Amino acid sequence: MCCDTLCVCPETPQTGEELYFLAAAAASARGYSVLTFEGPGQGEPLRVQRLPARPDYEVPVRAAVDYLLTRPEVDPERIALMGTSLGGYYAARAAAFESRIKTLIVHGVVFDWWTTQTTTKPALGLLAKLKSPRLVQAALDVAMRRNTGLRWAVTNAKWVHGVHDPVELVEEMRRYSLNETAALIGQPTLILHGEKDHFIPREQVDQLYATLRAPKTLRVFTEEEGAEEHCQFGNLTLLHQVLFDWLDETL
C-alpha cells in the first residue's frame, strides 16, 4: 500500500538521527512514511567522508528521491520535503530544481546565509569590509577571544564548509542564497518561524514569503504558545500539529 512520504534533510552539521524527535517520530504516528538522510556537510558525510557542505543541495536531494522511488510503499505523487534551520535553505533550493517534490516545508528560513549571519552577528559584517586577509584574521582573533558564541560560529562554519581562513568562509557563505532560485519554487510551501528566533531574523522570512510565486502559508509561533524560539524546540507538539495538519490538507 502506497502512502504519503516526508523526506527530511538536516541542517549542518546535524545528523540524521537528530531528526527522529524533530519530525520523524511524529510523522510516523500520523501515518507518513519518513526518510531522513545526510548530505555533504552533515553527519557521516562530513565527519567520516570529509565532504564539506555544498550550496547546490538539489544534488543530494535528487539522490534521496531516486532512492524513495525504489520503495514500493512510496507514492511518487505524494512526496514532501522538509528542511530545518539552514536545512530550510537546502530544502527550498532543492525544491526549485526537483519537480518530484510535491510540497515543501521551510522550518526556519535562511534566505541568504551571509546576511543571516551578519544580522545576528554584526562583527562579521564589519570584518568583511577589511581588505587585507591578515587584518581580517587579526581582528577576528580578537573578537573571538571576547565572544564565545562568535568563536563557536566561525570555527564550526569553517569546518562545515571546508575552508581554512575567514576570507574563504565569507566567499563560501555568500553562495548560499535563494535570491535567484526562490521564484522557481512551484510547490505549495509552508513557512514556519518563531517570533523570538535568535538565529534567523524575521526579514529572512518575509523575503522568502514575498519572493515565492507558489501557494504559500506562513505560520509564526508565539511566546504565548511556548514555541517562539528557534525551530520551536519549546513546543514540538504544537509544531507537529501545525505541520501535519497542513500536510494532511495539502499533500
Image (spheres, helix red, strand yellow):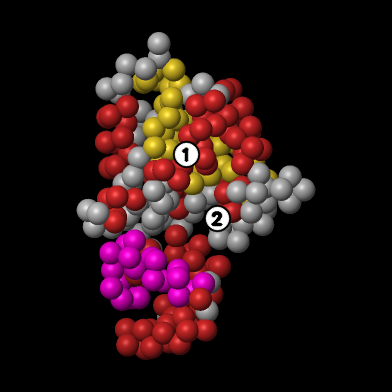
In the visual, does 246 lie left or right of 3?
Answer: right
Locate the N terminus by quadrant. Answer: top left
Residue at the location (51% across, 72% down)? 149
Residue at the location (60% across, 48% down)? 233
What's the residue type where badge 2 is placed?
A: Gln
In the rendered image, is residue 132 in sight?
A: no
Residue closest to the eye, 123 or 84: 84
Residue closest to the eye, 207 or 95: 95
Q: Main secondary structure of the magenta part?
A: helix
Residue at the location (43% across, 38% down)? 8
Q: Relative to 250, is 94 above or below?
A: below
Give the percent coordinates (x, y) of residue 161. Answer: 32, 62
Q: Relative to 28, is 73 above or below?
A: above
Q: To which quarter of the image does residue 130 belong?
A: bottom left
What's the residue type where badge 1 is placed?
A: Tyr
* Magenta run includes residue 167: yes
Judged by depth in the image, the label closer to the viewer, 1 or 2, is 1
Q: Where is mark 1, residue-wise?
A: 20
Q: To which quarter of the image does residue 152 belong?
A: bottom left
Q: Residue furthest toward the top? A: 1
Distance (Cα) linking label 1 and label 2? 26 Å
Q: To which quarter of the image does residue 120 belong?
A: bottom right
Give the percent coordinates (x, y) of residue 184. Answer: 41, 40
* Magenta run includes residue 233: no
Q: Relative to 130, is 148 above or below?
A: above
| First-in-chain label (1 vs 2) | 1
Where does the magenta region start and end? 149-168
Q: Classify mark 2: residues with Cα within 10 Å, few (<14), some (14-19) or many (20+).
A: some
Q: Where is mark 2, residue-wise?
A: 204
